Image (cartoon, rainbow, N blue to C red):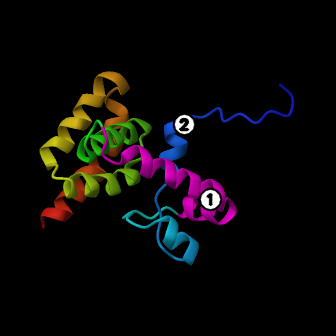
């Protein structure tokens, strides 16, 4: 339809690509509370779309809080979805949240393995080094 705006890319890729970045300005600091990753593109997104960024943050907060599924399980699902999108940098914050919720490195690795039959091995391999590097850093 003429004049209709449609996002034709992969929705998880857009969402996870746009979520994590550093606390450099007051609005950014408020938006990014609790995150551990930096993404300059999301900094630009926040600056240019503060209402949309706030709505996105609220959505993520709502869907990841404990409910029928506990927080760890939801973060493991988030990790799997992020892995499928191939966004390695986005995994770091979720790894930290999984571990904070009582998850283990083995649960993280197994979650990545579970994504392979659906997504194939290539998306997982794209993010695998980021996961292992971050886990090694945390264990050092």
Residue in the picture at 47% in, 65% down: 32
Nearest to the observer: residue 103 or residue 136: 103
Mark 2 Cα-neighbour bin, 10 Å: few <14, some 14–19, many ≥20: few
Instruction: Give the percent coordinates (x, y) of residue 13.
Output: 50, 41
Q: Mark 1 highlights which residue?
A: 45
Q: In which quarter of the image is residue 11?
A: top right
Q: Is residue 74 above or below residue 43?
A: above
Q: What stretch is highlighted in magenta?
A: 40-67
Secondary structure at numbered mark 1: helix
Secondary structure at numbered mark 2: helix
Q: Is residue 115 above or below residue 106?
A: above
Instruction: Give the percent coordinates (x, y) of residue 4.
Output: 80, 33
Mark 1 Cα-neighbour bin, 10 Å: few <14, some 14–19, many ≥20: some
Left or right: 118 with respect to 22?
A: left
Residue in the picture at 35% in, 50% down: 91
Instruction: Give the percent coordinates (x, y) of residue 53.
Output: 59, 56
Which image quarter is the N terminus in?
top right
Q: Mark 2 highlights which residue?
A: 11
Left or right: 35 with respect to 117?
A: right
Left or right: 116 with respect to 135?
A: right
In the rendered image, residue 55 lying in the magenta stretch gets the answer yes
Q: In this view, does 69 lie above or below 37?
A: above
Residue in the picture at 44% in, 38% down: 85
In the rendered image, residue 100 lying in the magenta stretch gets the answer no
Q: In this view, does 4 lie above or below 28?
A: above
């Amino acid at each position: 339809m003429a004049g209709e705006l449609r996002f034709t890319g992969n929705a998880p890729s857009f969402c996870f690509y746009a979520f994590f970045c550093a606390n450099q300005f007051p609005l950014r600091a408020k938006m990014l509370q609790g995150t551990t990753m930096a993404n300059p593109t999301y900094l630009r997104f926040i600056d240019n779309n503060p209402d949309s960024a706030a709505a996105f943050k609220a959505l993520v907060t709502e869907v990841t809080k404990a409910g029928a599924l506990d927080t760890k399980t939801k973060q493991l699902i988030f990790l799997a979805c992020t892995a499928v999108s191939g966004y390695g940098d986005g995994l770091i914050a979720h790894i930290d949240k999984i571990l904070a919720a009582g998850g283990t490195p083995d649960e993280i690795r197994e979650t990545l393995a579970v994504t392979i039959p659906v997504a194939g091995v290539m998306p997982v391999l794209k993010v695998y080094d980021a996961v292992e590097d971050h886990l090694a850093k945390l264990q050092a």
